[in-house]
Image (tube, rainbow, N blue to C red):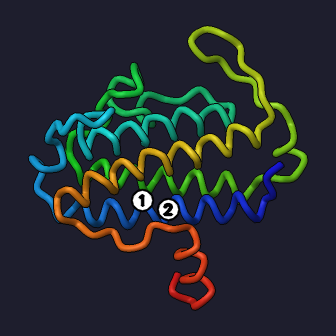
Amino acid sequence: MMTLEWIGALARYNRWMNDKLYGLAATLGDEARKRDVGAFFKSIHGTFNHLLVADRVWLARFTGVTVPDELMGPGGIRSLDQELYGDFEELRRERATTDDELSAWVAGLTPERLAASLVYMRRGQKQESPLWWAVAHVFNHQTHHRGQITTLLTQQGCDPGSTDLFAMLHEERRGHR
């Protein structure tokens, strides 16, 4: 099972990488961010949107709330590839807000809650798993798609530098975060 300390580190890494990649993407024009380059979610912008959709769905499952449409974007979430925000700066702000909410939720976890079952609906079917499995999935999912974004940014001439978890942990140790 994952520890609370480890989950906290993953939440910090999540924010660190999102800040880094959104910062790099901001140096590109809208056309470059939205260009269909054959990626699974077509573009840098499309992949960023997918991650926000997925994180909001999981955060709603974690908190047990019915998610209001305004949290899910105009008209609510209809698919995992929908564009919640066409404007990059709005998408970036919403990503930061969601990272704040995810970090606050992580900070409130207890070992007992982490070990408990998470029950939710997926495609009309009841699902159940230990909460820590779902938490691991969320952070792994982020890492998977951020790797895709890193590749797309590199192809556009952007250098993300080190994306290693170790790099963030060492920065923290040196007091740079």
Left or right, 112 with reference to 35: right
Residue hosting label 1: 18
Left or right, 98 with reference to 156: right
Marker disc for residue 119: none
Q: Residue most toward the right?
A: 112
Q: CB atoms at circles 2 and 1 under 8 Å apart?
A: yes
Q: Quick one: label 2, few (<14), some, or many (20+) residues within 10 Å?
A: some
Q: Secondary structure at mark 1?
A: helix
In front here: 41 or 78? 41
- At a point 53% along the width and 42% down the height, the residue shown is 141
Gap in Å between the C-alphas at discs 2 and 1? 5 Å
Name which quarter of the figure residue 75 lies in: top left
Q: Secondary structure at mark 2?
A: helix
Name which quarter of the figure residue 174 lies in: bottom right
Going by the numbered disc 1, the residue's amino acid type is Asn
Going by the numbered disc 2, the residue's amino acid type is Arg
- Residue 24, horizontal then vertical, whole percent: 26, 65
- At a point 45% along the width and 67% down the height, the residue shown is 163
- Residue 116, horizontal then vertical, whole percent: 86, 37
- At a point 72% along the width and 19% down the height, the residue shown is 127
Left or right, 40 with reference to 123: left
In front here: 63 or 70? 63
Taking 58 as reference, is 156 above or below it? below
- At a point 34% along the width and 61% down the height, the residue shown is 21
Residue hosting label 2: 15
